[in-house]
Amino acid sequence: MHRLARTSALVVTAAALVFTAGAVLGPPEPTTPAPALADAQAIASDRRTGPASEVRHGTASAGRPDPAPGAGQGGRPGAGSHGPAAGSDGRAAGGSNAGPGAGPDAPIGPDRAGETIARAQRRLRDLPKDYRTWAELGLAYVERARVTADPALYPKAEGALRRSLAVRPRGNPEALTGLGALANARHDFAAARDRARAALRDNPWSADAYGVLADAHTQLGDAAAATRAVQRMLDLRPGLAAYARASYDLEQRGDLAGATALMRRALDAATDPADVAFCRNQLGDLAWASGDPRAAGAEYAAGLAAAPSYQPLLRGRSRVAAATGNLTAALTDAATVAARTPTPDSLMEYATLLRLAGRTDEAERQLTLADAAHRLFEAGGGRDDLTGALLALARGDAPAAVRLARAEYARRPFADVADTLGLALHTAGQDRQALPYARRAVTAGPRNAAYAYHLALISLGTGDLPTAREQLRRVRALNPYFSPVDGPTAARALAATEAQP
């Protein structure tokens, strides 16, 4: 598998990028007519009556729908959408319910995962006590579950990894790292952290174990520990997996310029089409988060030229189409992604666009499928109350959304979870209770337009017009295109608040 060339100078440069603040990017300012202030205040109350607005899926509204290894929906070390998991290169920050990737270097597709599984099975028929191959088989099952959105493979992954430990109970960091990656995929981030720590006690130089540890710390809300783990991974093996996590770490702290610089470095070294597609997708997501849909679209197009079947690129292209007014093209791409990788986040994103197009019955069917996909994830040993909360919000069930978001936040006070809990409380009419969570999300994700928008909604609900105006201006400056539903609403609300003294 392709690896990036690495030198001592490269390590120093990467490390410097992780800890150096980048420039703030500003998008164009939309122009909208100034409605009455009552229109802005109505935004807050409307959120309490049903799913009229878009429900954010993981980090999709923030601009990273690609599965973040170990993350929640949509995104990167996520989930989301949440760096990649154990040695893989998917972005953590919220990923799909299928969980994070788990290869030794760059992201691999379903065929390559299948080839790894077949090769390991053949070897184990001849050498049933080869503990390293059992661990490799388990990791390959985790990766295949991610790229095929099939959590039914998680029990197979666990069986192979535990068989590896049974063959070699001590001195087996490969199996421990694999179990950590599996725990991240199932959203058991505390267990993933503990497994990674155990692997590092056996092998303090394991870059893969540091990757698992970084993903777990990110989702548990320990940003400082996540940064330390990412830095150690960079020091040990500055390849695509490390660059992806370091880029996500910078993005989480608001340094989109630094995050982009790291992904450009990775792209410059990439030669395999899958690696190029992955890097282009991350660069597209970063351009999107910066409020530049044209640049994002160019990155997605370049990625699709390298790897036409790479689904995250279609998701990105769908967002760009929706933002630029081409709802038909957006629906076409979203339908393709939902059919090929039917995760809860992809299905909910499709439902949002269908609702925007007035096709409410079809949107309801997609939400029913998302419910079923979520149940399959839990049947595979996962737990994801964040997705449960988002599904409840999409259905207009505010009490259930609050209950589920509170449960998730108790396990992991990650920014995405805090934001969802604040939004759920707001939808339930509990704006004052929602404020601390919305503020925490904005503090932890200073360049996330969706977080700022939700804080504006909650501030309007409490009657705090100055804060609402400040946050709506922030949305305009960060990414006025962050949502095809809520973006235009934010612009109208800002015009209303700016019309007031």
Image: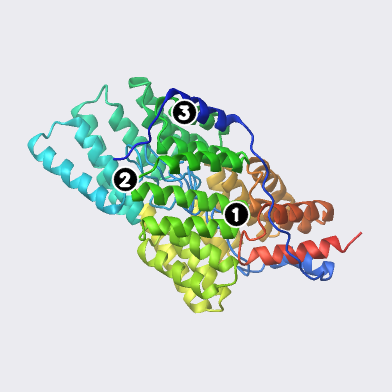
Which residue corresponds to mark 3? 10
Q: Residue 390 location in percent, x, y?
A: 54, 58
Q: Quadrant of residue 22?
A: top right
Which residue corresponds to mark 2? 142
Q: Residue 371 location in percent, x, y?
A: 44, 63
Task: Tell me the element at label 1.
Answer: helix
Q: Is residue 346 visible?
A: yes
Q: Residue 132 location in percent, x, y?
A: 22, 31
Task: Tell me the element at label 3.
Answer: helix
Which residue corresponds to mark 1? 402
Amino acid type at image mark 3: Leu
Q: Is residue 236 above or below residue 455?
A: above
Left or right of residue 132: residue 100: right
Q: Quadrant of residue 119?
A: top left
Amino acid type at image mark 2: Val
Left or right of residue 126: residue 488: right
Q: Nearer the viewer, residue 243 or 98?
A: 243
Q: Residues within 10 Å of mark 3 (few under 14, many from 20)?
A: some
- Cα distance, mark 3 to mark 1? 46 Å
Q: Residues within 10 Å of mark 1 (few under 14, many from 20)?
A: many
Q: Nearer the viewer, residue 233 or 156?
A: 233
Q: Nearer the viewer, mark 2 or mark 3?
A: 3
Task: Tell me the element at label 2.
Answer: helix
Q: Earlier in the sequence, mark 3 or mark 1?
A: 3
Amino acid type at image mark 1: Val
